[in-house]
Amino acid sequence: MIGRKEIETIKEKIAFHGPPVLSMYVDVDPSKPENVRKGWLLRAKNTLKELDIPSDIESEIYRMLDASKPEGKTYIIFAAHFFEQYLARSLRDKIVAHLASLLTLQANSSEVGEKIFPEIERIEREKELELLRQIREQPGLWGLSPVLEALQLGRLHIVALPWNLDVRVWRCTDKELVFADEATAKMFCNEKRESLVLRDVIIDLASNYGTRLKFVRGEAADILERQMDGIAGITRW
């Protein structure tokens, strides 16, 4: 799934884009004489003809308008779904799926969510399994002790962990070094050590070494916990 930086980039691209960005607010109040027999439709089409927009987009909007049965007094049309062909290649490459249109043009946010969230969930789970396959084939590292050691040597590019991360580790309170077991911690920390949950330190630890964290769920989390000692990583070298 894309991160906050990419989302902000998309927002900037859309917010300041010229044509073919298109928003239409059409008065469809049925109580007004000018809207009898879909008079609003004729006005909307006439407005589109005056705009300098690509013919394929214009035709698609005509199709949407002809099929629409708006309720209420104002019909809002936002053509953001035509943006893909105008996005930079770096953004188009981040598109992971195309979904069929909703059955109604007046879908609310809940209906949109019901359409897209299961697909997002499916794609995320597939990407997580692919990450674990990549770790096995590289080969990467797995197991708490090997991963923590490689992480603190700056060797790991990505670390994969289950969302329900509930494993304890040991840390030197004066050196900020983290170990998988108390025996190793004694060797390096002397008496200045503490036991804590890995989830409380892993984010800062990864940030210190420029390592990306990937929290996984579902089948990928099961594989991590059953076959890879709960943690795995892709190495830089």
Image (tube, rainbow, N blue to C red):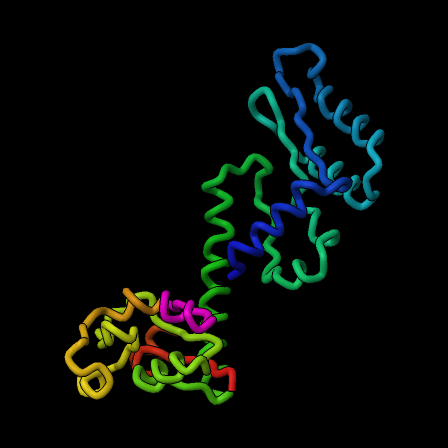
Judge whether residue 205 is colored magenta.
Answer: yes
Judge whether residue 84 is colored magenta.
Answer: no
Q: Quadrant of residue 177?
A: bottom left
Viewer-side residue, 157 vs 161: 157
In the image: residue 140, left or right of residue 60? left
In the image: residue 42, left or right of residue 144? right
Q: Residue furthest left?
A: 191
Q: Is residue 227 visible?
A: no
Q: What percent of the width, then of the height, locates residue 132?
A: 44, 79
Q: What percent of the width, then of the height, locates residue 47?
A: 79, 27
Q: Residue at x 84, y 29 (%)?
A: 50
Viewer-side residue, 210 vs 23: 210
Q: What percent of the width, then of the height, locates residue 29?
A: 62, 17
Q: Residue at x 75, y 26 (%)?
A: 44
Tell me: residue 56, above or below residue 88.
above
Q: What percent of the width, then of the height, locates residue 208?
A: 41, 70
**How many numbered discs sit on the rendered protein?**
0
Q: Is residue 17 visible?
A: yes
Tell me: residue 191, above or below residue 111.
below
Q: Quadrant of residue 163?
A: bottom left
Viewer-side residue, 31 vs 178: 178
Start and end of the magenta stretch? Answer: 204-217
Q: Residue at x 76, y 40 (%)?
A: 18
